[in-house]
Image (cartoon, coloured by chain):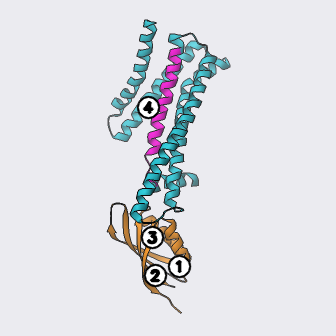
Chain colours: A cyan, B orange
Amino acid sequence: MRMFKRLKRTLRYSNSAEYPRRYAVMNAFDGLITILGIILGSKLLGSAEAGQIVAASVGALIAMGISGASGTYMTEMAEQERKIKELQDAMLTNLEGTVLVKAHREAAVVSALVDSAAAIFAGLLAVAPYFLTVAGYLSEVAAFYSSLIISLSLLFTLGVFLGKVAGRSLLFSGLKALGIGCITLLFLLLLNLVL
Amino acid sequence: MSRVVLDILKPHIPSLVEFCREISKVRGVKKVNGLVVEVDAETDSIRLTVEGKDIDFDELQSVVKRLGAAIHSVDEVLVEG
């Protein structure tokens, strides 16, 4: 509770309240589409086994997590330092050591962690059925369809969330996000036909 | 010191409410009154009236600084013997 309060204060003081939300949705989207691509590509264009799909997915998610965290940290830190500099120019004083500077720097770390965690979490949810297949609880066909349903449902949910943020039609926003997953599916189906 | 009036330049964040709440935690402070005098693009000029008993002025100064604000002038002081 205390940690949550501190986090809220950090985001408020750094004027970055919407950043984690933005990064969470953006990278959860990335994670889902990547896993969807791996699963569909492995099944439609190749004949990978569950273990290979899990290995490829985990590898991709770790890479996305590291790339997301480092990229976001560097970008956000640069942005936050710029904000601090602007504030210092307005105040005509050095703000080093103040709660504001601390909050701006912490906001960059929070954004990086959220960015990384969102991709890994969403991706793991999408590939979860294949973990069950590897453990021997689920057939490969069932894992394929379960992963597909989970991925598309999560994409729809993210769309609905964005619709809520924007104050627009939840259904339309959800369908728009779902459409992106369907485009990925369509591309791979076409590629399958061509090859 | 039982009363001090300060002219302060602060960023918009923390808000005046949060700013005054933090000042009220300073040793000896019983009452804080913040008044916005001027609002600029990035900053607020405020007139802060702090009342109490044996107000720790050093701590008051350091809290103001920690909150990212700067004391422009000390406009009024009341010390009771």
State the SS at label 1: helix
Sequence-first tag of 1 and 3? 1
* Picture coordinates of residue A34, whole percent (x, y): 50, 25
Q: Which mark is residue B57?
A: 1
Q: Which mark is residue A157?
A: 4
Q: Residues under labels 4 and 3: Cα distance? A: 47 Å
Q: Residues within 10 Å of mark 2 (few under 14, many from 20)?
A: some
Assess whether mark 2 and mark 3 are in contact (beta carbons under 8 angstroms): no
Q: Residues within 10 Å of mark 1 (few under 14, many from 20)?
A: some
| Residue at x 38% of width, y 23% of height | A179
Which chain does the numbered disc 3 sit on? B
State the SS at label 4: helix
State the SS at label 3: strand
**In magenta segment, residue B66:** no
Number of numbered discs present? 4
* Picture coordinates of residue B8, whole percent (x, y): 41, 72
- Find disc 3 in the rendering and name its residue: B70
